[in-house]
């Protein structure tokens, strides 16, 4: 979750303009999806995020937001965590 929030915070700090509440929620859920995909042994599918949103977002929207976030973060998806300094 910490890495997910890192992605989300960095994305919001560099994204252009204001986002509506749906884009905000989609970005938050997609950041969680990316963090799981990159840092866990078993990845989840975009369909799972779609189901968790109770149908508010489609799989295509999740994958499009994933690319948008990764591009905005310049594909820097391995931030230092507290465990890096222990």
Image (tube, rainbow, N blue to C red):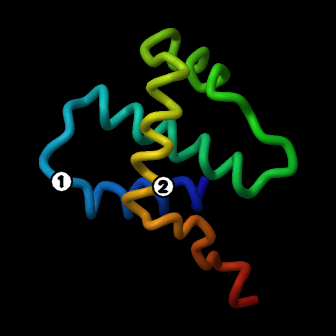
Residue 80 sits in quarter: bottom right
Where is residue 54? Give x, y as percent.
Answer: 52, 11
Where is residue 55? Give x, y as percent.
Answer: 49, 9
Labels 1 & 2 near each other (Cβ < 8 A): no
Residue carrying label 1: 16
Q: Residue at x 51, y 46 (%)?
A: 31
Numbered mark located on residue 60 in the image: none
Q: Residue at x 70, y 55 (%)?
A: 38
Residue carrying label 2: 70
User: Mark 2 packing: few (<14 Cα in 10 Å), some, or many (20+)?
Assistant: some
Q: Sequence-wise, which precedes: disc 1 or disc 2?
A: 1
Q: Secondary structure at mark 2?
A: helix
Q: Residue at x 44, y 41 (%)?
A: 28
Q: Secondary structure at mark 1?
A: loop
User: Mark 1 packing: few (<14 Cα in 10 Å), some, or many (20+)?
Assistant: few
Where is residue 14? Give x, y as percent.
Answer: 26, 63
In the displayed structure image, the side of residue 36 where residue 54 appears, left or right: left
Q: Nearer the viewer, residue 51 or 69?
A: 69
In the displayed structure image, the side of residue 72 where residue 41 appears, left or right: right
Q: Can you say whether 2 is above or below 40 in the image? A: below
Q: In the rendered picture of this protein, how many numbered marks are placed on residues?
A: 2
Quadrant that contains the C terminus: bottom right
Residue 24 sits in quarter: top left
Q: Residue furthest right?
A: 41
Q: Nearer the viewer, residue 68 or 11?
A: 68
In the displayed structure image, the side of residue 24 where residue 58 appears, left or right: right
Q: Can you say whether 38 is above or below 85 in the image? A: above
């Amino acid at each position: 979750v910490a890495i997910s929030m890192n992605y989300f915070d960095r994305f919001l700090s560099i994204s252009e303009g204001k986002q509506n509440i749906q884009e905000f929620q989609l970005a938050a859920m997609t950041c969680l999806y990316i963090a799981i995909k990159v840092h866990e042994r078993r990845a989840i599918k975009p369909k799972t995020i779609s189901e968790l949103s109770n149908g508010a977002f489609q799989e295509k929207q999740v994958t499009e937001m994933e690319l948008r976030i990764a591009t905005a973060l310049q594909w820097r998806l391995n931030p230092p965590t507290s465990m890096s300094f222990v």
